Image (cartoon, rainbow, N blue to C red):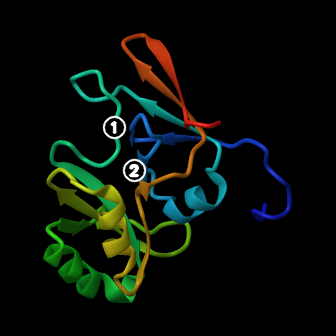
């Protein structure tokens, strides 16, 4: 199905981390571009960090993905290193993981992000980066599983 074939009033998609402002870290499944296109309304996240706090943008060292064009992996990895990341090509079965769009994923180990929006802009500014796992200002609502219960977070004004 093409994204414009059926109008979607609601999509539900998982996230790796989400904060109270509904900014999320996603991409452990490797479908960043498709998720960006369809994930607009409701996000879900499992088990927030050990403090019982859901968050986006690593507060502890964490792996965040960047989807990149295969021919530019070394170039993108170098630029990501200049931004303070430690990128590694995601592997599957001893070979580079290939996204559903035919790209590679660089998993970027990072220290805590002081400004996720500025970080996203910097990564998006690298030629041949297709997308990142920083989903900022996308969801209107998130359901966060924590301690056997579900917390319902909603964007202010929604």
Q: Which mark is residue 55?
A: 1
Query: Residue 2: x, y in percent?
Result: 77, 65
Residue 61's spot in the image, x, y percent?
15, 48
Q: Position of residue 109 (x, y in %)?
A: 19, 57
Query: Residue 124: which quarter of the image?
Result: bottom left
Q: For residue 152, which quarter of the picture?
A: top right
**Which image quarter: residue 20?**
top left
Q: Residue furthest front?
A: 157
Disc 2 marks which residue? 28
Spatial separation of the CA atoms under disc 2 and disc 1: 16 Å
* Left/right of residue 114 with respect to residue 90 in the rendered view: left
Which residue occupies 14% across, 53% down? Answer: 111
Residue at 68% across, 43% down: 11
Residue at point 22%, 81% (across, down): 79
Rendered location of residue 133, percent (x, y): 40, 58
Quadrant of image for the C terminus: top right
């Amino acid at each position: 199905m093409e994204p414009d074939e059926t109008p979607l009033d609601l999509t539900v998609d998982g996230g790796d981390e989400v904060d109270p402002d509904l900014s999320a870290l996603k991409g452990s499944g490797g479908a960043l571009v498709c998720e960006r296109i369809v994930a607009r309304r409701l996000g879900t996240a499992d088990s927030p960090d050990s403090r019982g706090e859901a968050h986006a943008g690593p507060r502890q060292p964490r792996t965040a993905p960047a989807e990149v064009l295969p021919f530019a992996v070394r170039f993108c990895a170098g630029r990501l290193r200049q931004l303070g990341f430690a990128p590694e090509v995601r592997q599957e079965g001893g070979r580079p993981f290939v996204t559903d769009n035919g790209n590679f994923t660089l998993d970027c180990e990072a220290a805590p992000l002081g400004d996720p929006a500025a970080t996203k802009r910097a990564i998006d500014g690298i030629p041949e980066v297709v997308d990142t796992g920083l989903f900022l200002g996308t969801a209107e609502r998130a359901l966060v599983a924590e301690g056997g219960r579900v917390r319902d977070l909603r964007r202010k004004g929604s």
